[in-house]
Image (spheres, rainbow, N blue to C red):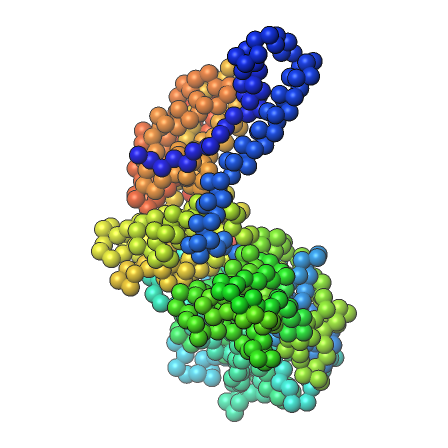
Amino acid sequence: MPLIAPVLDDRSFDQLRQELVDRIRVYNPEWTDYNRSDPAITLLELYAYLGEGLQFRFNQIPEATQLAFLKLLNLPLRPAQAASALLRCTGKLPGGVALAVGDQLKAGKLPFTVETETQIWPVDCVSVSRQADTLPDEASEPELHAAVQASIDALAQRDAQLKKVAAYRNVLLEADGSSPALDFSASVDGCVWIAVLKDPALTLTPPQGRAVRLNIGYSPAAVTPTLAQISACDGPSARGPGLQWRASLAALDAQQQPRYLNLRVSGDSSAGFTQEGVVRVELPEDLTLLGVPQADDPALAGSGEFPPQLDEARAKQLWFWLRVWRSDESRIGATRLICVNAVQCRQFSAVTPASAELLGSGNGQPRQGFQLANTPLLSDALHPVQLQVEENKVWTDWQQQDDLDASGADDRHFMIDAEAGTVMFGERFPQLGERVRVLGYRYGGGSAGNVPAQAINKFATALAAIAPPPAPMQRAASGNFTLANPFAAQGGADSESIAEGLLRIPGELRRRSRAVTRDDFSELAMMTPGVQLGRAECLPLFYAPQQVSPRAGVVSVVIWPAQDALHANAPQPDAYQLKQVCQWLDSKRLVTTELYVIPPTYRRIAVSLALKVKDGYGLDAVRDWTELLLRQYLAPLPPYGPDGRGWPLGRRVFDRELEGAAMQVEGVEYVSELRLAAQDAQGLWQTRSSVELQSWEVPELAAVSIVDDNTALPEPGADLPPPDSDPAVPIPVLREAC
């Protein structure tokens, strides 16, 4: 029989009062006044009120038992996740301004902590891609054709083996994030050209012996790969492709060709321009070597190895060019931001040795626990809690462990409950009178850290004990630079609630952090740290790149983001979310399992229906409610869909069930006619009684047409453009003739 948790006593105040009044007739028949004016009735109501309170406390016993089991199983609630953001700074001092790891910034009153050491210089940048274009026609564009032909002739004169030229146009990506995303993979040379700009009257004066480091911030555009582009989750996250960085020199070589200097990269958190991060590039000690190479023949400007040409205003501020490409012959993809003076930060605060916490003294008993002053904690392998115990009047370091199952009586180990902010010891514990202190940990996080763009714009007092900059560099002050986040912070998530934790107990006991069954993969995907998903489904034996099923040893997991402002009806995860879920599940899968994390595939459908509106109801209101209900019925995310869990993968769509859904709207008397259509591979709409879906597909309601029963019913999908049918705007090749 099923295990049903009973409600031990569910009687209300009115029921308790009525039971007491009914007993009067049995125990005291002479009592006949049951009205509220009787003082004895008032006394009975008092007992009923007290009894209801006791029942409420009594009914908490099952929940308290569940919480006790949760503690015994050592399954703490999931802690909050900290939001992260990429900042763009603008410096004013020629000697540079230093931001150290641990310095704090603010969005209103919310603290953000700097995670990358940064030198902020009074420079700016703009990125340029040489996008392919057609050669101008001599008849229609004679002047432009003559200018382009002069460049070709000049190149041919220098290189007798010249066989092919590629016409291009300059497409700019602004450093403030205001321009549309730019796909650098479509460039003719596979390079990203970054023009470093500064005031020509300003000379940088770095401290003696200090190299000038430029922090280049990178943020990819939110692009969802196709199933054919998805690769298997195999091993831990790679470093990404290497980037080759060159800086232009003012002087030409002996053949009058531009010269470029190899630059040293001292750090790259962008994994080769594949994820949001910062690349630290070191400039040469002699900054006077840098410059813009000028061709001796004006017709060669911007051609071959010479850098692109900028407009007159930017050309006056141009200091030198950075040229970057990938060393593995792959190309840098769609990008929404490249900027200098970039800073990475996360929404947390830190306890440092300067503000160490004394937790108390040991009592000589096992399983001792101590409460930290700040919660929730943000703890990972790179930033564990730093704890010491005073043993024989000497402070001794102890090590944090994920669990204490393998810790013995000789191991100085402890574990933490990040959500509750508690420290727990195992078989070895502080003895009576031994003091315990914490020297450092991180705390904070939550969805409040997902602040909008331009919100992080204040500088708070730096944490002096964390990585102070060298003496010659000037410390950051609010008047020395400005800062802002071009895009909204992301990744923040609140701590798990008790109700969510109790629902998680059966799944944790079943899988024990291992993905074996279909439910294991989907449930673990929903728990991916730093990614907010609305739904995850597992497709066993489905090989995503070729859309083949069954295939032995293959598992594909389809994920939907919790929200997608750009695709409200058909939410799609971006490459970053797919990568995070892939890395998370990769550590949980069996060694023999080939795992793919894929976006959902949508089948576009259209519906048109004619309905009869009841008297007293407006057609416009009923039409709006009907469209809303149909969209919710076909939605892929909970709490919508036929069963409240989103439209099931591969489930057919019938016109009859959509008619039944429309009949649920108040004000609809009947549906006189309904037509359902699906879009084929050629983008044409085909009317059908049902739409068959593949096992990896869900429907996308592309259009709804609703009319009254006296109007001719339009064809489903009429006047609806096919997806991605926006024509590219032709731009002529406009090169300045010097």
Apparent side of residue 526 relative to residue 31 in the rendered image (left or right): left
Q: Quadrant of the C terminus?
A: bottom right
Query: For residue 472, which quarter of the picture?
Result: bottom right
- Location of residue 319 by image quarter: bottom right
x and y percentages locating residue 676 in the rendered image: 37, 30
Q: Position of residue 496 (x, y in %)?
A: 51, 50
Q: Split into 4 quadrants, where in the image is the N terminus?
A: top left
Residue 247 appears in the rendering: yes
> Residue 693's x, y, as percent?
31, 40
Query: Is residue 204 something that shows in the picture?
Result: no
**Residue at (42, 57) in percent of width and height:** 581
Q: Residue furthest bottom?
A: 254
How far across and down, in percent of the image, does residue 728 sit? 49, 53
Point 35% across, 67% down: residue: 235
Relative depth, front residue between 496 and 540: 496
Q: 501 or 558, which lies in front?
A: 501
Apparent side of residue 477 relative to residue 102 in the rendered image (left or right): right
Q: Nearer the viewer, residue 687 or 665?
A: 665
Identity of the residue drawn at 64% across and 68% down: 357
Q: Is residue 316 above or below residue 493?
A: below
Compared to 311, does 656 lie above or below? above
The residue nearer to you, when weighing 448 against 45, is 45
Count of number-bearing discs: 0
Q: Is residue 2 above or below residue 43?
A: below
